[in-house]
């Protein structure tokens, strides 16, 4: 009676090794960041970055906010990371001539100037394609992606959802993506 069970288990194990993995890239940790959970996680990642920060962001809004604003704090931490000799690269959305596109381009251009004055490489995407991405990769290992823009609304009142993924292969995939859209 034991022999058929052993044969059955052997067949199941053999068959299961032929199936594709549920996650094609290995992941060490996944952490959901719901609503206001995003900001402290991202702030901590930027503060402790040692090698690199890649940021692709649809909208970063400074207008009408004070120096204690969370967006301003994140930008200051990016600048501080650059001072610590962390490689910091940023891509921001630039849009077409429709009213919403001009608005996004305007707020991102303001941020671009602030970051470039502080030695950070900032690129704009192709104005024929909307880059609606919100992704941060830190030290080639941790990726944060989701719906959070860097705006007062996203940090204070919107229903937002992002995820923090600790995985070198995932980070590499998003760094490659960064370079594919940088112009």
Image: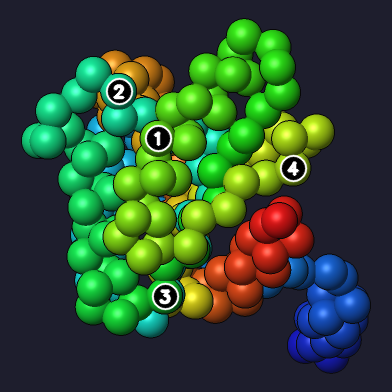
| Nearer to us: label 1 or label 4 | 1
Q: Position of residue 66 (x, y in %)?
A: 13, 28
Q: Separation of disc 2 and disc 1 at Cα?
A: 9 Å
Q: Separation of disc 1 and disc 4 at Cα?
A: 18 Å
Q: Are marks 2 and 1 in contact (CB under 8 Å)?
A: yes
Q: Is residue 147 visible?
A: no
Q: Which residue is mark 2?
A: 63
Front residue (pair 97, 81): 97
Q: Separation of disc 3 and disc 1 at Cα?
A: 21 Å
Q: Which residue is mark 3?
A: 87
Q: Of helix, strand and loop, which one carries label 4?
A: loop
Q: Is residue 54 above or below residue 86?
A: above
- Please state if 7 lies on the left or on the right of 70 as rendered: right
Q: Separation of disc 3 and disc 4 at Cα?
A: 23 Å
Q: Tell me the crowding category of disc 1: few under 14, some 14 to 19, or many 20 or more residues within 10 angstroms, Cα based.
A: some
- Picture residue at 42% right of the left edge, 67% below the top: 88
Q: Is residue 170 above or below residue 6?
A: above
Which label number is shown at residue 126? 4
């Amino acid at each position: 009676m034991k022999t058929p069970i052993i044969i059955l288990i052997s067949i199941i194990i053999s068959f299961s090794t032929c199936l594709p993995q549920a996650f094609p890239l290995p992941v060490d940790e996944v952490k959901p960041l719901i609503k206001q959970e995003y900001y402290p996680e991202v702030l901590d990642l930027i503060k402790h970055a040692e090698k690199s920060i890649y940021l692709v962001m649809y909208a970063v809004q400074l207008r009408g906010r004070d120096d204690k604003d969370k967006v301003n704090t994140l930008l200051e931490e990016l600048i501080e990371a650059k001072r610590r000799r962390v490689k910091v690269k940023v891509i921001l959305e630039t849009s077409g001539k429709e009213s919403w596109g001009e608005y996004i381009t305007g707020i991102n251009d303001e941020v671009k100037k602030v970051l470039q004055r502080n030695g950070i490489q900032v690129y704009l995407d192709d104005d024929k394609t909307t880059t609606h991405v919100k992704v941060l990769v830190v030290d080639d290992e941790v990726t944060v992606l989701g719906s959070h823009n860097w705006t007062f609304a996203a940090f204070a009142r919107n229903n937002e959802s992002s995820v923090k993924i600790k995985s070198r292969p995932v980070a590499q995939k998003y760094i490659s993506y960064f370079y594919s859209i940088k112009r």
